Image (spheres, coloured by chain):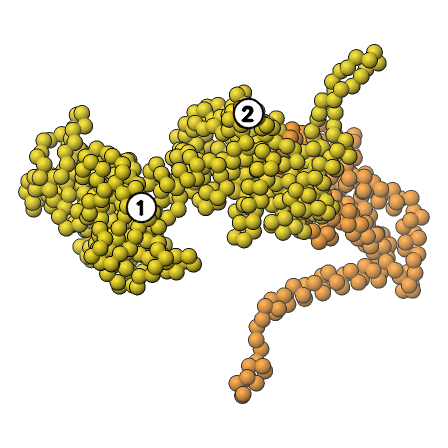
Amino acid sequence: MANNTNEKNEKIIELINVTKSFEEGVYAVNEMNLYVRRGEFVTFLGPSGCGKTTTLRMIAGFDTPTSGQILLNGKDISNLPPNKRPINTVFQRYALFPHLNIFDNIAFGLKLKRVMTEVKDKNGNITYKATKLSKQVIAEKVEKVLKMVDLEGFETRSVSTLSGGQQQRVAIARALVNEPQILLLDEPLGALDLKMRKDMQLELIEMHKKLGITFIYVTHDQEEALTMSDTIVVMKDGVIQQIGTPTDIYNEPKNSFVADFIGESNIFSGTMVGKKQVRFIAHNFDCVDDFELNEKVDVVVRPEDIFLMDEDKGQVKGEIIASVFKGVHYEMTMLVGKTEIVIQDTVERKIGEKVSLFIKPDDIHIMKKEFSSNIFDGYITKKNTVCFGDGEFECDVTQLYKGSILDEEGYLITAEGEKLDLTDVDVKVEVGLKDISISDDEEAGGAVGNIVSIIYKGDHYQLIVRTDENEEDFVFDTEDTWNENDRVSVIIPKDKIILKLKAENKK
Amino acid sequence: MENEVKVKKGFSFTRAHLCFPYAIFLVFFVILPLILIVYYAFTSKSGRISFENFIWFFSSWASIKTLLISIGLSLLTTFICLLIAYPVAFILARMKSNKNVILLFLFIMPMWINFVLRAMAMKELLDLFGIITKYNYLSTVIGMVYDYLPFMVLPLFTTLSNLDKSYEEAASDLGANKVKVFTKITFPLSLAGVFSGITMVFLPCMTCYVISDTFGSGKVTIIGKFIEQWFGTGDNWHYGSVIAFILIVIMFISTLFTGGFSEDKNSRGTTL
């Protein structure tokens, strides 16, 4: 147990380069490095399939890492079976044993426990012997833990007569009664209704404070994570995105994924245009982060950090297109050019009202963009070409539906024989950095713009061509030399335009 | 108004009408025969109500011996089936799904081959080793186990593969080693399938005399054979009925034991 401050800071569990792969080449958890301090309340947060449950299962011992080490108090436990680990788990669906009553469920671990007791042999020498806990000790412990979870008198009830919330409490009691060094909780509140969940959150925080046991909690609910944890580990695709306190993670998200996952946020594509100056939604904003000139960045602004003002007073003009009352504040959507911005404010602005927005420099969070391809919003035209980035390009629309073909009239025939008209269908367009070329001839390509940036990358240049109308950027690699401000057209081969249906169009 | 009256007069097909065919079947092939059995069992040859058939059965050593032998053979068969089927079902249930389908098929396939044909084939096989003529009871048990094994495997497999793995993980998490996990969690939670399998093997074993005839060289008489004899060559429907009635009572009691009438939805596994 953690009594002095020295022990409090020591690592109770440490994951070193832990990788778990269930299928060749597919990683549930990839090269994970993490440690948890004694007595900490740590939450693994992420969308489903991010590897958070797999990580928890490896700590519990249900899964063994494909490679890497798990250290408990400095000792490698990677291959130790679950029953040999001083760790207990509260399962997602509780997993209470249906054939045992509440008492026997909770006493399950205690009955299996062996303790070393002093025994005097015939000659009076003291030896140690592993003995079972006495019935009386077990009964006392069960009673105590039942009292803690407010279920006194439930000993003889059967599991099926209990409500979800009560089963949850039994599951927690069954784990805690063994006095584990670490308590693992796998989305334990997922099956409860909102009110019950809120109550249980507070109770769990209370228990954690009182018992001083290390809690490792798994959830996909960002609010739950922010409320309960000392430390949050945000995960995505088996990789840790950020580790930090709730305040850190909320205020200083490391990348756009974290920003988007934790709380509501507006994420813009921006470009650094000067020292501590970033350009997005067609305006140069002062900011506090410094990046290289012309670097493409993600800009994150929280809805509550945007101030609405009368039309002429703010930085960028726009129009309110939606407003919803959310109790404490109004959630309004403002349209700036083609970009929708979500704003929370206690003062309501009417739909259709012309307004302007203002953002303080330190509320603009700038993150390095992991740039691997160009992503645009586009739509399919009548001629089965695609419009994006202020231009129109030839494309292969049959890739939208697997096994489909085009008939002579330009309708798409799906593999199931369905006839579809794709005109005006919204799509996500992806173009790789190596798949764009440019030409002096303004008629040669699908879009026209000026070269705004040339960055030398060792053996090639990375260029940005920006269009006039909506300031859309095409980023690409080339070995040719160009000059800044050259006016060029953008050429993309038909087969290099990757189209994806937007989620709302999917059936 | 008029419309409403018309609707009431006309025949309207409801869901309840769907059970008419089965209701007719039930009356002619289940309820009537049962009434006949009870009638014959409780009447004498002269048609008077009496218990003399029961007195005959329980005072005749031959009939009691047949009953005991039937029960003994069936218990032994059921037990052996359980011993063989449980590990197999356990392994099948734990396999990756694409593999276990084929293996399960191999276990279930014999059920599709004609039952008599299967019995004959097994008999020929046992004949090769000379078991049939020397050990009538042993060969009968082998034949029964061979024929009824799939009926034990299937319910066990269904129960075990539907068993939520998190129960076992929870037990292991709470400190149970592999043996304890099995004895304290897996086996108790699969009892539904065990009982289901027992019912599906034990009850037919008591009555199916084709197997005892084939494998016992006519020297093994089970209770089913006894009934057949009284209805056929013995020409005493009253004696035949009383044995059938006693058998029904025994089956009823054994079903009570295996929890067949229990309300708890967990107590019975899925059968065929």
Q: Which amino acid is tagged 2? A: Glu
Question: Is residue A176 shown left or right of residue B217?
Answer: left
- What numbered label is drawn on residue A301? 1
Q: Nearer the viewer, residue B29 or A19?
A: A19
- What numbered label is drawn on residue A10? none
Image quarter where the C terminus of chain A lies is: bottom left
Chain assignment, label 1 = A
In the picture, one chain is yellow; tell me its letter: A
Question: Is residue A486 shown left or right of residue A371?
Answer: left
Does mark 1 fall on the same chain as mark 2?
yes
- Figure check: A422 above or below A235: below
Q: Colour of chain B?
A: orange
Q: Residue furthest front?
A: A313
Q: Nearer the viewer, residue A346 or A501?
A: A346
Residue at 53% x, 39% y is: A186
Q: Image quarter for residue B44?
A: bottom right
**Residue A264 image offset from top left, x and y in percent:** 37, 48
Q: Nearer the viewer, residue A24 or A5?
A: A5
- Is disc 1 placed on a helix, strand or loop? strand
Residue at 34% x, 61% y is: A348
- What numbered label is drawn on residue A7? 2
Let me know if residue B133 appears in the view: no
